[in-house]
Image (cartoon, rainbow, N blue to C red):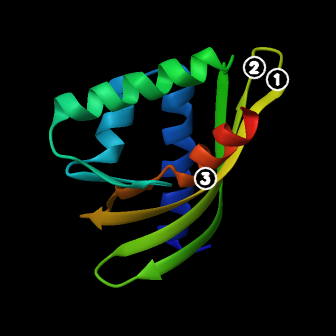
Amino acid sequence: MSDANAAIATLIADHAAAWSSGDVDAIADVMGLPQMLARSDGTTFIEDDGQLVIWIEERLAAWAALGVAAITATVETVEELPDEAARVTSRWRLADAGGAERLAFVAVDTLACDEGDWYFVVTDVAGEDAAVAGRT
């Protein structure tokens, strides 16, 4: 595994742990601004901290309403892109307090690197949207 792949795998795992703990600041720090959210119905642009915090809090609340208590994510593939960027496919698993799966989805995010620090540029929520829609 290359150094970049190892750093990305750590970033994704730590990002999922921040979501799992509900640490809004840690989640926002990794996401970066501006942030694009690729949704099943189009793209949303987030340009300031306030918008990002609202989106994170709404997502945490939606997951809590599904009974989610633990979140994990593992990297499946890393495709290197020009200019220190990568397209990352990861599998997310959201479970209840007893460990039963409440939601699972695949995300295909675009990351960039600045002086060795990876961050999200495009966050893919289309897979999550489809998984949620399949539950209703």
Residue situated in front as seen by the camera: 111 or 10: 111
**Three-letter amino acid code at disc 2?**
Asp
**Three-letter amino acid code at disc 1?**
Gly
Above-or-below relation of 81 to 126? below
Q: Position of residue 11 (x, y in %)?
A: 48, 50
Mark 3 against mark 2, which lies toward the viewer? Answer: 3
- Identified at 50% across, 49% down, the residue is 125
Above-or-below relation of 66 to 117? above
Q: Which residue is mark 3?
A: 127
Question: In the shown orientation, is residue 58 left or right of residue 101?
Answer: left
- On the question of residue 25 being in view, the answer is yes
Q: Residues within 10 Å of mark 2 (few under 14, many from 20)?
A: some
Above-or-below relation of 5 to 90? below
**Marks 1 and 3 in Cβ contact (< 8 Å):** no
Q: Position of residue 56 (x, y in %)?
A: 38, 29
**Three-letter amino acid code at disc 3?**
Gly
Question: Of label 1 and label 3, which has the lower sequence position?
Answer: 1
**CA separation in Å, label 3 and label 2:** 19 Å
- On the question of residue 92 being in view, the answer is no
Residue situated in front as seen by the camera: 118 or 43: 43
Q: Position of residue 61 (x, y in %)?
A: 49, 18
Q: Which residue is mark 2?
A: 96
Q: Secondary structure at mark 1?
A: loop
Q: Secondary structure at mark 2?
A: loop
Q: Secondary structure at mark 3?
A: helix
Q: Exactly how many numbered labels are in the figure?
A: 3
**Marks 1 and 2 in Cβ contact (< 8 Å):** yes
**CA separation in Å, label 1 and label 3:** 21 Å
Q: Position of residue 122 (x, y in %)?
A: 37, 59
